[in-house]
Amino acid sequence: MKKNFCRVLVVALLLTSVFAISNLDSLLNAFKSISTNSDSNNNVVNAKSTEENYLSLELDKNKAQVGEIILAKVNVYDIGNLAGFQINIKYDPEILEPVNPDTGDTMKTRTMPKDGDIIVNDNYSVITMASNDLKEGILNFGKTYTYFDAYRKTGNAERTGTLAVIGFKVLKEEPTSIGFEDSVRMPNSICGTLMYDWEGNRITNYTTSQPSVINVKNSEGSISLELDRNSVSVGDIINAVIKINDVDCLSAYQLNIKYDPEFLQPVVPDTLNPYNSATVPDDGTLIANEEYGPFSVAANNIEEGILNFGKSYSFLSDYRMSGKGEGSTGTLGTIGFKVLKEGNTSISFADTITMPNSIFGTMLFDWNGNKITSYSVIQPETITISQSTETPVETPEPQEPIKPADAHIIIKLDKTSAKVGEIIKAYINVSDITDFAAYQLNIKYDPNVLEAVDVNTGEPFGESTAPSNGDILDNSEYGIISLVDNDISNGILNFGKTYTYMEEFRNSGEAEESGTIGVIGFKVLSEESTNIRFEKTNTMPNSISGTYLYNWYGERITDYTVIQPKTINPSSDVLENNVSIVVDKNTPKVGEIITATFLLKDVNNLAGYQLNIEYDPNVLEPVQSSGEAYKTRTLPGGNTVINNEKFTPLTVASNDPEKGRLCFGRIYLEMASLKEKGISEGSGTLAEISFKVLSEDRTEISFERITTATGTALGAILIDWDGNEVPDYTIQKSVTIN
């Protein structure tokens, strides 16, 4: 029974987020598996999934007055051999209060929902866990059977039924929603849900279904998809304009548009280049103010005829504080559709399970970040297509942008070796950036090793301190605006600058294309190997290594490279760290294979670990010994620790090679036996990873900072034989190549 108990312990560890993974996705992070979820009249419904295996949150009513209780049931349908689960549910605590549905008593931090009719058999010893956050409107709870063997031997699997029942007391009669929601505490969950079978393995072959909006009011504003024509011939281009009418203070949106790919092909209206998975519509008149940092994201499925995209302002507080909401009427963008085939077809907004609680596949947000619900959705009319009597319009092949050979942005250090107390000057330079007129940058450093200071006075940076001026973007005649949002305690400098009078700047004909943007001082606090680097951040999605550059038309520039600075004090002995990285060569050529070894030193009683590795996928490609590229579940080899079969090692991987992230780990299931025998693994090799060199650009292999149960760690979680995170260990941050 001890072995069985240890398997349950691992499930419990996973449920409480021992294996955490960094999530840098934006507001639009639910873009992956797209499908529709509407009734025959195109109305949003509290529907069950069309899949056989699914999990749903079902409400007994969608209209309720103040004081009434809405009953929410977490139901599963045909999920095989179910033995444990964890659920994360989000609601608005100002509008709803979670209560016991029988007594009306308010739920508390450790209150479990009312039992359903499965995972309740005491013969298999039920363990329950709850960690609710009532102030934030989060219910997080789970259950698991302990005696897996006894449950499994019965052969009577629990597949369909109710996991939990929650009452929600209505505090305000306003539109609101309840739904499953992803959480950083539940890495790799499916819409905030984790399911486990009677072997203790994760179940993934199911979908989730969300309830519809509660207390929806009569629509006031509207969003429409307006076509410039409905009667067309093969080869014609239809322009579809997305229009907003009477929706105040709009700050973000996500849309899901469905079309028939046999009849229509989405194209960029100006160039007629076909859409791909990441194409977003041309800008409209709304959410287009560069001062508030607009960014766009898309996850289109061209083969299935689905366009799923969105846009949001980054600086909501600045937008809100301006007191000047954008006009309530305007456009979000225009999509071209090339006509391919004779017949009748349509283009429409359509619901999808990846946008729970959407209104016909649309989600709009105001400048407080709140979802807007008081609007209607106007669909276009059917399209009639006739056979063309003329030569069809040829779609030109997409043209690769011409990239200037030397266009780049770089952090150039005046020295890379410095003693404690010395100041290193970091010059942020650009070269050959055509018609350069604005930028936003995110720079990361280790605040335990370096202190950002004014390069002239030595005064430490504050949250709103900008770098000293350089020699470009410094002409006051063009109305300079600077924005700063540093996070000094976490070693983050985030700042930007733009010319306001771009027309005057353009008319001058004197472009600023090369020079120094600014200068930052870094005071050395500890003489150890460290790095300063441009780095991506949640608030700058789609940035190029944490950089946004814009030209004097206000258009984003993308045809440049980012050059990171050299390592500071590189001679420091990396092997003094508990976790370190070494590579077999530092100056490889294109096509060569380099091997990165991740080493462990002097850690007591190790029983498990997780590593989060980051690299530039444009420069390096992780490959297996066969030469095959890494995939989502590829595990590295070469480990000399956590590999003793007597203690049943479990391996986990959740890589994202396209984004340059590898996340993997190993943990012993038989921790109690490991401890009982006193076998302490504390030094050795955690992993060896081979990388194929794609470019000779300077780059790094580094640990990616992740959230853990005890705080934030730099890319590594170590677990001892009691199942606790190992405290106070040191990690080498990165290794530089070329």
Image (cartoon, rainbow, N blue to C red):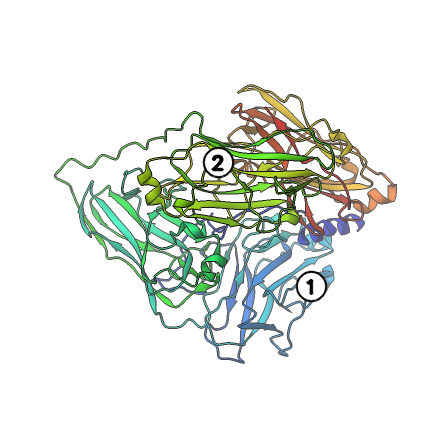
Residue 139 position within the rendered picture, expressed as x and y whole percent measured from the top left: 61, 64
- The image shows residue 635, relative to residue 155, as above or below, that is above
- Rendering quarter of residue 613: top right
Residue at mark 1: 121
Secondary structure under the numbered disc 1 in the rendered image: loop
Side (left or right) of 708 relative to 402: right
Residue lying at 52% horizontally and 48% vertically, measured from the top left: 25
- The image shows residue 395, relative to residue 15, as above or below, that is above
Q: CA distance from mark 2 to mark 1?
A: 72 Å
* Depth order, front residue of 257/133: 133
Residue 215 position within the rendered picture, expressed as x and y whole percent measured from the top left: 45, 73
Instruction: Please tell me whether mark 2 or mark 1 is closer to you in this view.
Output: 2
Residue at mark 2: 471
Residue lying at 58% horizontally and 53% vertically, measured from the top left: 80
Side (left or right) of 328 relative to 616: left
Residue 604 position within the rendered picture, expressed as x and y whole percent measured from the top left: 82, 40
Exactly how many numbered labels are in the figure? 2
Side (left or right) of 49 relative to 344: right
Side (left or right) of 159 relative to 498: right
Residue lying at 77% horizontally and 45% vertically, measured from the top left: 726
Secondary structure under the numbered disc 2 in the rendered image: loop
* Depth order, front residue of 718/15: 718
- In this view, the residue farthest toward the left is 389
Placement of the C terminus among the 4 image quadrants: top right
Identity, as a three-letter code, of the amino acid under mark 1: Asn
* Depth order, front residue of 201/345: 345
* Depth order, front residue of 566/543: 566
Name the N-terminal-most of marks 2 and 1: 1
Badge 1 local density, few (<14 within 10 Å), some, or many (20+)?
Answer: few
Q: Is residue 299 visible?
A: no
Q: Is residue 132 visible?
A: yes
Residue 459 position within the rendered picture, expressed as x and y whole percent measured from the top left: 65, 45
